[in-house]
Image (cartoon, rainbow, N blue to C red):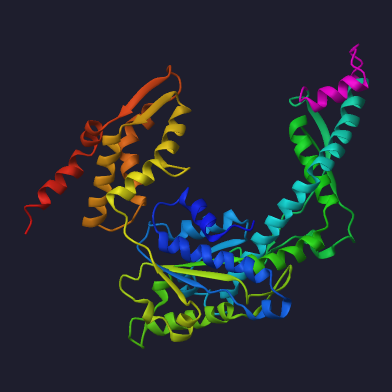
């Protein structure tokens, strides 16, 4: 998808409110990848991504911008937390687990695409197998049914037999065995011996719909070439992969070169080779990290970006600061995005026959409380809205059970103030505190 930076920002605007500077930076970084892909091979190898550091409090959209960006262009995306690499057993060698995870994501993405390409063919083959089973069963039953082959095939395609129970021989796949505790690497016994062992099958009873899904999955696996998938996945991870490293400020030394700061600096040096460009061996093949886009993010309340080691700073030339969310931002977050929070709650409660609506003054009151709460206690950005909304809707959510007729419920300012009375009172008292 060759979107221009303006188009990328427009797409991000559908889900993320504000933070224009950060959106522009990631949009340019993404477009530069497309520009690089159009150059000759010699020059293409020379141009490396301009990695980005995002500075801003939690809950203002840092992760969401990176995640939506990857989703937009179907890029392999992995989020890791820098603090993970300070834990016992994770320091050093295992920083490369983020690269292995990226390749896993890329393999899954490419596999899904290839399966979608052969889906029609796989479904035809699955229907053919199911037809043989059902036709044989109908003949054995001899119930005097007037169904002929054409009728059975038509009924099968139309889902008339979906709830009928049949017996099916399915491939018995051995469960993967964990090599090391912690789930870092797993391996299937069947994969070790490859094609030397015949595939074991076991007979199971299931409904036709389940059998159809299983057979489509089996036939799809036969129609796709796993080697070409792995090759394509490595290529995509190398050229289109995005790794988001969160909590980067937690591994920034604060000027003291003794104690825990030495460990923090060590983690930065462990991550550095992957950002600079190196080769990592995975079970799907070797991957070069030179052209992976790294986006680092942190609140940087105590440590500053300048506290990171110079080499690390040098590999993240683009710096953007995300702003604190205001009352106006909260109002927009509540009602404007495609996945707006109010819409989510309305749809959830609709399941239990509650027709929920919010008045404009209710949204203003919620936004004002969220802004004050973030100012007076820990600033958790848009996540504060979830806390407030859960409090407001707790009684309604608890009592709704779907057994009653459709009830119309209107949330207005008075209701919000009634439910959050103690919270509002707390703010009224703050003006008397010197």
Residue 301, quarter of the rendered image? bottom left
Q: Residue at x 85, y 37 (%)?
A: 124
Q: Residue at x 39, y 55 (%)?
A: 18
Against 353, residue 329 (above or below) is: below
Against 119, residue 402 (above or below) is: above
The number of discs equals 0
Q: Check the picture and name the quadrant holding the N terminus.
A: bottom right
Which of 12 and 209 lies nearest the eye of the viewer?
12
Image coords of residue 430 (percent x, y): 12, 52
Q: Residue at x 58, y 69 (%)?
A: 32
Q: Residue at x 54, y 67 (%)?
A: 29
Against 434, residue 35 (above or below) is: below
Image coords of residue 9 (percent x, y): 49, 56
Residues in magenta?
Answer: 141-160
Image coords of residue 48 (percent x, y): 60, 77
Against 80, residue 314 (above or below) is: below
Which of 41 and 184 lies nearest the eye of the viewer?
41
In the image, residue 150 lies in the stretch drawn in magenta:
yes
User: In this orientation, does residue 15 appear?
Assistant: no
Q: Check the picture and name the quadrant holding the C terminus.
A: bottom left
User: In this orientation, does residue 323 appear?
Assistant: yes
**Position of 179 compared to 227: left or right?**
left
**Position of 92 compared to 223: left or right?**
left
In the image, residue 391 lies in the stretch drawn in magenta:
no
Residue 162, quarter of the rendered image? top right
Image coords of residue 313 (percent x, y): 45, 81
């Amino acid at each position: 998808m060759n979107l221009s930076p303006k188009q990328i920002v427009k797409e991000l605007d559908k889900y993320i409110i504000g933070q224009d500077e950060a959106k522009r930076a990631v949009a340019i970084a993404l477009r530069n990848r497309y520009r690089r892909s159009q150059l000759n091979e010699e020059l293409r190898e020379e141009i490396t991504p301009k990695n980005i550091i995002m500075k801003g409090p939690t809950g203002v959209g840092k992760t969401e911008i990176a995640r939506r960006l990857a989703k937009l262009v179907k890029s392999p995306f992995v989020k890791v937390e820098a603090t993970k690499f300070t834990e016992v057993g994770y320091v050093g060698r295992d920083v490369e687990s983020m690269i292995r995870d990226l390749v896993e994501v890329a393999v899954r993405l490419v596999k899904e695409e290839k399966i979608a390409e052969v889906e029609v063919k796989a479904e035809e083959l699955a229907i053919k197998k199911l037809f043989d089973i059902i036709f044989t069963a109908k003949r054995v039953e001899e119930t005097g049914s007037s169904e002929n082959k054409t009728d059975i095939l038509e009924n099968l395609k139309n889902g008339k037999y979906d709830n009928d129970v049949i017996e099916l021989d399915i491939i018995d796949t051995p469960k993967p065995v964990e090599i090391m505790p912690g789930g870092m690497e797993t391996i299937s016994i069947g994969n070790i011996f490859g094609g030397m062992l015949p595939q074991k099958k076991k007979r199971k009873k299931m409904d036709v719909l389940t059998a159809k899904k299983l057979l489509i999955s089996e036939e799809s696996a036969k129609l796709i070439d796993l080697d070409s998938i792995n090759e394509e996945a490595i290529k995509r991870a190398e050229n289109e992969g995005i790794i988001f490293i969160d909590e980067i400020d937690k591994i920034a030394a604060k000027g003291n070169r003794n104690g825990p700061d030495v460990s923090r600096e060590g983690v930065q040096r462990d991550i550095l080779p992957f950002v600079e460009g190196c080769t990592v061996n995975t079970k799907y093949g070797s991957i070069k990290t030179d052209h992976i886009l790294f986006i680092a993010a942190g609140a940087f309340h105590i440590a500053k970006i300048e506290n990171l080691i110079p080499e690390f700073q040098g590999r993240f030339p683009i710096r953007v600061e995300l702003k604190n969310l205001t009352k106006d931002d909260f109002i927009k977050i509540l009602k404007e995005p495609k996945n707006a929070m109010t819409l989510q709650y309305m749809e959830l409660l609709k399941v239990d026959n509650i027709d929920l609506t919010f008045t404009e003054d209710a949204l203003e009151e919620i936004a004002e409380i969220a802004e004050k709460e973030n100012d007076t206690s820990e600033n958790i950005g848009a996540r504060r809205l979830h806390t407030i909304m859960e409090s407001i809707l707790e009684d309604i959510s608890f009592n709704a059970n779907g057994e009653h007729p459709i009830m119309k419920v209107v949330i207005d300012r008075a209701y919000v103030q009634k439910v959050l009375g103690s919270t509002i009172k707390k703010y009224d008292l703050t003006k008397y505190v010197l």
